Image (cartoon, rainbow, N blue to C red):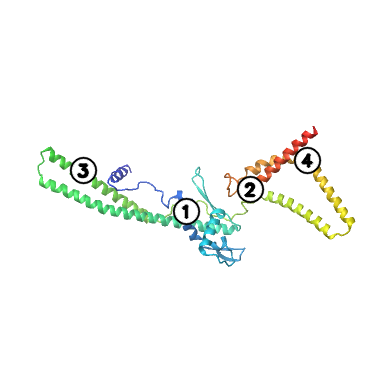
Amino acid sequence: MGNLGGLAGLASQFGVNVPMGTTADLSSPSLYPELLRSRTFAEKILDKEFYLDKYGKKLSLLAILTHGNKATKVGRDRLITDAINKLNGDVLVFDQDAKFTFSVIKVTAEDPIFAKELADVVLAELKALNRYFKSESVSQKNTFIENRIASVEGDLEGSEQALKDFNERNRQISSPALQLDQERLERDVEVQKGIYLTLKQQLELAKIEEVQETSVVQVLDRPTVAFKPSNKNLILSVILSFFLGGCSGIMIGFIRSYLDNKDMEERKKLRRIKHFLKKKIKDLFKDRRIVGIVSGFMLVGLPLFLGTQSSNPVYFGMYSPIHLIINTIYLIIFLFSSWLFMHLSRQKN
């Protein structure tokens, strides 16, 4: 390998650029994120069809990401652009951490079976596209090396012929000038021979690489169907549903009772109940113990809310837009309850 590197360096002095290591061409693993976000890759998978229970039939990925099973008057170019934006923004994520060797492709969708099938298609097309770029790169290298071999072979034959003619003209070399000329011709032949051998070695290596059909993409874990949603907080959803449902039900019940009841006495009773509820709610906010308990529970839950990372983080490398809004509201309520608790404590003292 050291001899080959020396010959490659010698060849580079004569304008022959022989690659000795892995170059960052389109088949390089370092370019996978850009490759997955490219229009070329998207157009290869957008026409693939998938079955969704939501539609009850197979649809192309382009239709699933845009108009569904409804007719549309939008042109295909516009649909492809919209589908690529949605595919790269919400559906397909390439997670590549510099600290680890492995990379992860995440597919997020409502239907877990569709997500698994789409992940399989993404891996298959990534392999095919990587193999295509690799084959194209090797083919271009073969063509370049063969052209250089033909050129260097001519120069080598010319150098050998010049040395032969010199030896035939000077069978007995005694003068220093003739010895210097002979050494110069011999050196020229050795240099051309070294370049020629280097190119021949590289051509053989390139032909071996061209025969190999394997792709650089190697899959450790195949895609599987998810058993549960990955971006839903069940506890938070239940709490919010209970709170919003209860408040909405009470409000709707009061409104309907007020509108349906024309008796003034009944309306007065409803007003008294409404005033009673308002008074009790105000008392809750003025009760230092209740406010303190709420603040304490929110303080305990604060690390859970702020330390949980979203499956598709956008802000601060941690939170999705909805997660950020929920955390902001939680933090505002916590700060308000803490301020109210300290304010009531000062008033009591």
Amino acid type at circle 3 is Arg
Q: The C terminus is located in which quarter?
A: top right
Amino acid type at circle 2 is His
Which is more toward the observer, 75 or 234?
75
Marks 3 & 2, CB-CB < 8 Å contact:
no
- In what element is the residue under mark 4? helix
Marks 4 & 2, CB-CB < 8 Å contact:
no
Specify which label sits upstream in the sequence, 1 or 2: 1
Q: Nearer the viewer, mark 3 or mark 4?
A: 4
Relative to 62, is 7 on the left or the right? left
The residue carrying pointer 1 sits among few (fewer than 14), some (14 to 19) or many (20 or more) residues within 10 Å by Cα, namely: some
* Cα distance in 3D space between marks 1 and 2: 29 Å
Q: Find disc 2 in the rendering and name its residue.
A: 323
Amino acid type at circle 1 is Leu
* Cα distance in 3D space between marks 3 and 2: 72 Å
Specify which label sits upstream in the sequence, 4 or 1: 1
* Cα distance in 3D space between marks 3 and 4: 96 Å
* Cα distance in 3D space between marks 4 and 1: 56 Å
Label tally: 4
- In what element is the residue under mark 2? helix
The residue at 81%/47% (across/down) is: 278
Q: Find disc 1 in the rendering and name its residue.
A: 35
Q: Which mark is residue 290?
A: 4
Q: Which mark is residue 187?
A: 3
Specify which label sits upstream in the sequence, 3 or 4: 3
Quadrant in the rendering for residue 288: top right
Image: 142 above or below 184:
below
The residue carrying pointer 3 sits among few (fewer than 14), some (14 to 19) or many (20 or more) residues within 10 Å by Cα, namely: few
The residue at 68%/44% (across/down) is: 330
